[in-house]
Image: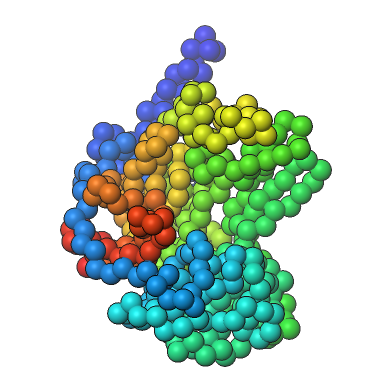
Amino acid sequence: MKKLIYLTLVLSLFLFCAPREGKVEKIMVDGVAHIMNPENPLKGTVLLKVEKTREINPYIHEEVGLGSFSSIRDADGEVILSDSSRAEAQRFNRNGEYIGRLFREGQGPGEFPERRLLNVYFMNNQIWVTGFRKLAKYDKSGQFLFERKLGYRPRILVDENTFFIREREWKEQEWLDKISLVNLSSDKDGESSIIDFFQKENIGMIRRKDGSGSFADVRSTPDIRFVYDQENLKLYVGLNTEYKIYVKNLKGETMYIIERPYKNVKVSMEDKKKLLSWAKNDEFGKWMLSVYPDTLVAIKGIKILPKGYLAVNRILGIETVEVDIFDQEGRYVYIMKPPQGVSLDWVKFYNFGFAIKETKEDGLEVYAEYKIKNLPDIFR
């Protein structure tokens, strides 16, 4: 009898929490709204109509020594391509013309050494660079203005005194990863305050059973995914193994939680060999196959879209990812599909569309921009 009552309660809870077909339910749990979305988007699947509007090949300039680069773009169309491993940040104007290097390699004022995990930002009509536990500011023309020593490694810059960090705390064979917000005093030598936003134990790597080695794989390693919406002052954060995204304000308070039905993709040993193709014939790498998880993570990445929308790269198979789109209230509105030959795995979205890296026939990567010609409720 007790067992029957228990099963009845579980079934009732499931029916209460699950969204009705095609409907979005808002459920309050401990004072926090859970936005329970249906499995299918409210407005269906949209195949993007795109037009390539710009391409920058940095390697036609002899003075540019970029390896694998990341990019940022400002509202005026200036682009900076940066490479942390070579301490390079190269500037290009709105016409794609090369206008010079932002800073020199070194340890002096406004300089950065190699391999220091640089991040470059456009903010307040200025250029900001973090790395080497310092923050440097340059004006729009690239002239160095000042720098500030930091006791942290910023991951996302909110303003010149505020940034998100990710830190790992070890205790014997266990560890804790935390996403926190650091607020520095405007006084150069002042105090700082830290607000913890999200934390999880023993994530970010898959370890050998004896603890002698580890590796990470974006499709299978449990990890934290987070992104900051600068315009709306929201942090989206969650564990990639489940489809549950916490939306937080800058006080660290959870405003609401976005959820969507999801079942993690199971992988066979043959699938694992495809995913780690280099490891199957390598003695050193074979142990990786032995500890590779039997399921993939749910979320490959999350990105901010214009007008407060959110893009979530959902893993559908060992080689397949779909892009789910949520509106400002956490409602699942679209699946966004790129045209053939264009990947949305590693894009940066802007009001006009997106920027990506494309690989040319010679193997070199170039920067490219695409205008999105449909979805006017998101892109202009």
Q: Quadrant of residue 42?
A: top left
Q: 374 above or below 103?
A: above
Left or right: residue 173 compared with residue 234: right
Residue at 67%, 79% (x, y): give it.
106
**Coloring scheme used:** rainbow
Left or right: residue 38 compared with residue 124: left
The reply to whether residue 252 is in sight is: yes
Left or right: residue 370 compared with residue 217: left
Residue at 39%, 50% (x, y): give it.
345
Left or right: residue 64 compared with residue 221: left
Question: In this view, which residue lies farthest toward the top?
Answer: 1
The reply to whether residue 120 is in sight is: no
Q: Residue 129, percent across and down?
A: 56, 76
Q: Residue 79, percent across and down?
A: 40, 75
Q: Residue 162, percent across and down?
A: 58, 73
Residue placed most toward the observer, 266 or 245: 266
Count of numbered circles in the view: 0
Residue placed most toward the observer, 48 or 26: 48
Q: Residue 247, percent across and down?
A: 46, 55
Q: Quadrant of residue 214?
A: top right
Residue placed most toward the observer, 159 or 28: 159
Residue at 67%, 34% (x, y): give it.
284
Q: Quadrant of the C terminus?
A: bottom left
Q: 251 above or below 25?
A: below
Residue at 35%, 57% (x, y): give it.
360
Q: 173 above or below 159?
A: above
Q: 283 above or below 370?
A: above
Question: In this view, which residue lies farthest toward the right?
Answer: 172
